[in-house]
Amino acid sequence: MAYIAAIDQGTTSSRCIVFDASGGIVSVAQREHRQIFPRPGLVEHDATEIWANVRAVVRDALAQASLSHADIAAFGITNQRETTVVWDRETGEPVHNAIVWQDMRTDALIKQLDGDLFRERSGLPPATYFSGPKLRWLLDHVDGLRARAERGEVLFGTMDTWLIWNLTGRHVTDVTNASRTMLMNLETLDWDPELVAAMGVPPAVLPEIRSSAEVYGTHEGVPVASALGDQQAALFGQTCFAPGEGKCTYGTGAFLLVNTGDQPVRSANGLLTTVAYRIGEEPAAYALEGAIAVTGALVQWFRDKVGLISSAAEIETLARTVDDNGGAYFVPAFSGLFAPHWRSDARGVIAGLTGYISRGHLARAVLEASAWQTREVVDAMNADSGVDLTTLRVDGGMTANNLLMQFLADVLDVPVVRPIVAETTCLGAAYAAGLAVGYWPSAEALKANWHKAAEWEPSMEPAARDRGYRKWKKAVERTVGWMDEDDD
């Protein structure tokens, strides 16, 4: 059995990538799913559609490489994290659309929670981002659901749990996904009874918490042997196994994680404390995370809702028609501001508009927004760790944009490095599954697979960098406080 298959259930699509023993890609299959927007600020997915797409991409990836299940040593799973689904234990039917991590319907609820308690136990501030409040919303708003939950008739899970249950029949999650619920104790790595009670969740609906790399069960005779939230999977795929090593993934949003070792580090600067991974019975590794809600999603909005480009790749061509942003700054607070601000009352703004601004300037401002948001997170990370970032490893779809990568190096004033295999989210899930079944001998052996594909060195003058960052922060100030209490 020469290969490992990784299932990546993401925010906009599901993929299956088959890897060989060197971490090389053998085949890829991908299918998009619908984004459902019932009202402004609300985002849902059809979990049944996603499960059908996952089955299809596994079949397609195997067929593309002329492989069968007998050729696969293990399946690994990585997933969009906080997205929440509840389903009937007997029929397997979801009771409601999945509520996506970007969804903001829990804004009123989180204001009622004890922020100090949740930060201390779970490492997370009360925010619409996390899955515990989404579960509570479903229990409160789906007719009869709370009573059914208390009787044990329904099950809760993030997307890893939904997939593992459908693949193996087992109701489990891993420590990385559980650490995104606001319900798991970072020290015990189990559900915290006080947090569960404070959130108003019946314990009977919660899955069992397991490590990130172990055999949860089998599907078509193949072990299902890993589960990691997508950003932790990318950290693992970038082989950031030592304290101080980190990466930033640019997809729908952007997520900067730095490994902090076997002890959780509390942030004083708006970052999240999270579990990085746990391999079998080994001690868990922890991370600090800066979560940015909207990066690639802004390019998608620019394409689909505004229509100024016809493909995501076209934005770089359009942005290169001008030399700078013309004074325009775009703060995409579509789901409020995440790290380091955590302001759910913020909404997006375009600042600095004049009659001079063209389509090219707007395209450039869209790309630059991802870099400036990263700068805010890196500043917070440097302050928390006491050690300045010296190099940023990057991955994800947006890293194909060379203009963005150069601008990122410029505003951070550090080299930006992309590996040969940029699909590090899937690779991390594959690595963890392979370790669980002995396909690879050790985590350290995986480091030999990492190779640099491209590097961008900073070239911006310090005065220009400082002026741009000052303008960016002025634009951010104009986003906060936009929502009023009577807004939906």
Image (cartoon, grey):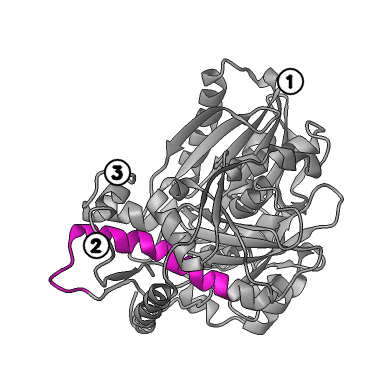
Mark pair 2, 1: CA separation: 52 Å
Q: Earlier in the sequence, mark 2 or mark 1?
A: 1
Mark pair 3, 1: CA separation: 39 Å
The span picked out in magenta is 353-379
Q: Are marks 2 and 1 in contact (CB under 8 Å)?
A: no
Q: Is residue 109 above or below residue 447?
A: below
Residue 65: mark in rendering: none
Q: Which residue is mark 1?
A: 1
Identity, as a three-letter code, of the amino acid under mark 2: His
Percent position of residue 372, x then y? 43, 68
181 or 240, nearer to the observer:
240
Q: Is residue 127 left or right of residue 41?
A: right
Q: Is residue 206 visible?
A: no
Q: Which residue is mark 2?
A: 361
Identity, as a three-letter code, of the amino acid under mark 3: Ser
Furthest residue toward top: 66
Percent position of residue 281, x then y? 87, 50
338 or 350, nearer to the observer:
350
Residue in view at x 21 percent, y 51 percent? 307
Percent position of residue 270, x then y? 58, 77
Q: Which residue is mark 3?
A: 311
Mark pair 2, 3: CA separation: 17 Å
- The quarter in which the N terminus is drawn is top right
Percent position of residue 394, x then y? 55, 52
Q: Magenta stretch: dominant SS?
A: helix
Identity, as a three-letter code, of the amino acid under mark 1: Met
